[in-house]
Image (cartoon, rainbow, N blue to C red):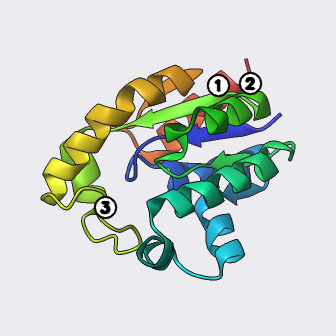
Amino acid sequence: MNLVLIGYRGTGKSTVGKILAERLKMPLVNLDDRIIAQAGMRIPEIVEKFGWDRFRDLESQVVVEVAKEDNHVLDCGGGVILREKNVAQLKKAGPVFWLQASIPTIVSRIKDDTQRPSLTGKSFTDEVADVLREREPKYRAAADHVVDTEGKSVEQVAEEIIRLFEK
């Protein structure tokens, strides 16, 4: 059984995932890193050259691969929930934990991230708000557990997930 982390960028998936992997003695699999390795280019380059649909196709391929693995912490990209087939695969792989944070917190955490191109072309804060509004129902539907990361240390978030995972 895997432990699956979903949520918008800046909610702590990668940082918490590292702690979870260490404490649970499970390998960490970052889906975006797998996509980058398979494509041989960074995400902004994939999107610029081939478009978002091609990136999402690559993401779906990687989801199928990692869902077959066992006893891993899966750190998923923020948009993985946009395709129902991805959600179905991830739910089969193990319990899905949705990490949440407020819009101001997310913006403060990811404002300097240059690895992801704009999804909407709007101001950064407006884009985060709009994308979250669109994705929240999908995150909610995919999640077995909702973990609010607001005002908590990454260690506290990891402990909360471990308690839920070991039940």
Which quadrant, please, contains the C terminus?
A: top right
Residue that numbered label 1 is attached to = 163
User: Which amino acid is tagged 2?
Assistant: Glu
Q: Can residue 26 be seen at all in this image of the molecule?
A: no
Where does residue 37 sit, x and y in percent of width and height? 68, 75
- Which one is closest to the eye, mark 2 or mark 3? 3
Q: Is residue 77 left or right of residue 85?
A: left
Q: Residue at x 57, y 31 (%)?
A: 97
Q: Is residue 141 left or right of residue 107?
A: right
The numbered mark at residue 166 is: 2
Residues at marks 1 and 2 touching, judged by CB atoms closer than 8 Å: yes
Where 163 sits versus 39, above or below?
above
Q: Residue at x 34, y 68 (%)?
A: 117
Rate crowding at label 1 as few (under 14), some (14 to 19) or many (20 or more) other CA atoms within 10 Å. Answer: few
Q: Can residue 54 be seen at all in this image of the molecule?
A: yes
Q: Residue at x 55, y 62 (%)?
A: 54
Residue that numbered label 3 is attached to = 110
User: Is label 3 in a helix, a strand or a loop?
Assistant: helix
Where does residue 49 sit, x and y in percent of width and height? 47, 79
Q: CA distance from mark 1 to mark 3?
A: 28 Å
Frontmost residue, 66 versus 16: 66
- Which one is closest to the eye, mark 1 or mark 3? 3
Q: CA distance from mark 2 to mark 3?
A: 30 Å
Q: Residue at x 46, y 36 (%)?
A: 99
